[in-house]
Amino acid sequence: MKGKKSQNSKSKRKNDKYKKLLGNISKNQDIDLLEYFHVYNENNCRSCGFFFLFIKVCMDKYKNKDTCETKKEIYKNYIIYILNKYANHNDLNNIYIFKMIPENWKISKISNYINFYLRKKLNTQTNLEIYHNLIKSSYLNATYNLIKKKEEKILIQDSIICNVCNTAIEEKEFVYFSETVVLHIKCVCKYNPPQLT
């Protein structure tokens, strides 16, 4: 009697573990183990290259000549499922995946992955172009302001007095620091700017 109870409790624990894993799903339906073990989470990447390695292993098994056709179909379905479901994952942002996919596969099977991959690449390219154009714009703006300051014309209506020698500036060429500081070219080396305190 005691042996039967312990056997029943073991089978009950086994069934409880099975139900915990599968929930109320029947035996015939597949479950997504990646979701169950929380391998993929949009906010937290814990895979550490798992998706790429999984696809590589499945592709090696698929391309193996010793693998039977039914197994090949299973591996192909695994690859297509991972590519389409987890297209957003950084592991799958890899050009080598396209090189691994056989040419005889229908592109419609992995269209979700290709569509997302191309949109991501286009978005990255657009962001880079925007970034470079902003840098160019900033550079051009700074250059324009510099040229504008260099070509600034000063209209002299009154006589201007040199701040160093206190004589009138009659030459066409002179040094202009501000409205209050104007010098002869010969007086520049003698000029001492006021110290800021």
Image (spheres, helix red, strand yellow):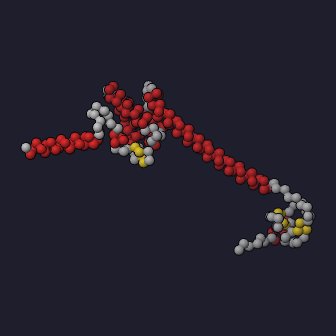
**Quarter where residue 128 is shown:** top right
The answer to whether residue 186 is seen in the rendering is: no
Q: Is residue 31 left or right of residue 140?
A: left
Between 3 and 34, the residue placed more toward the observer is 3
Where residue 89 appears, as percent x and y from the top left, is: 45, 41
Q: Is residue 4 visible?
A: yes
- Count of numbered marks: 0
Task: Decide: is 185 above or below 48.
Answer: below
Which residue sits at x=56%, y=40%?
Answer: 123
Q: What residue occupies the far left of the structure in this picture?
A: 1
Q: Quadrant of residue 27?
A: top left
Q: Position of residue 30 (x, y in %)?
A: 32, 34
Residue 111 in the image: state x and y as whole percent: 47, 31
Q: Along the horizontal axis of the image, is 72 left or right of 173?
A: left
Q: Nearer the viewer, residue 130 or 100?
A: 130
| 195 sits to left or right of 12 | right
Where residue 137 sits: x, y (%)? Answer: 68, 48
Residue displayed at 78% across by 56% down: 149
Q: Nearer the viewer, residue 94 or 23?
A: 23
Is residue 127 depicted above or below 72 in this figure?
below
Relative to 100, residue 91 above or below: below
Left or right placement of residue 73 versus residue 114 in this view:
left
Q: Which residue appears at 79% of the width and 56% of the height?
A: 150
| Rendered-image quadrant of the N terminus | top left
**Residue sitting at the far front:** 24
Q: State which quarter of the image contains the C terminus.
A: bottom right
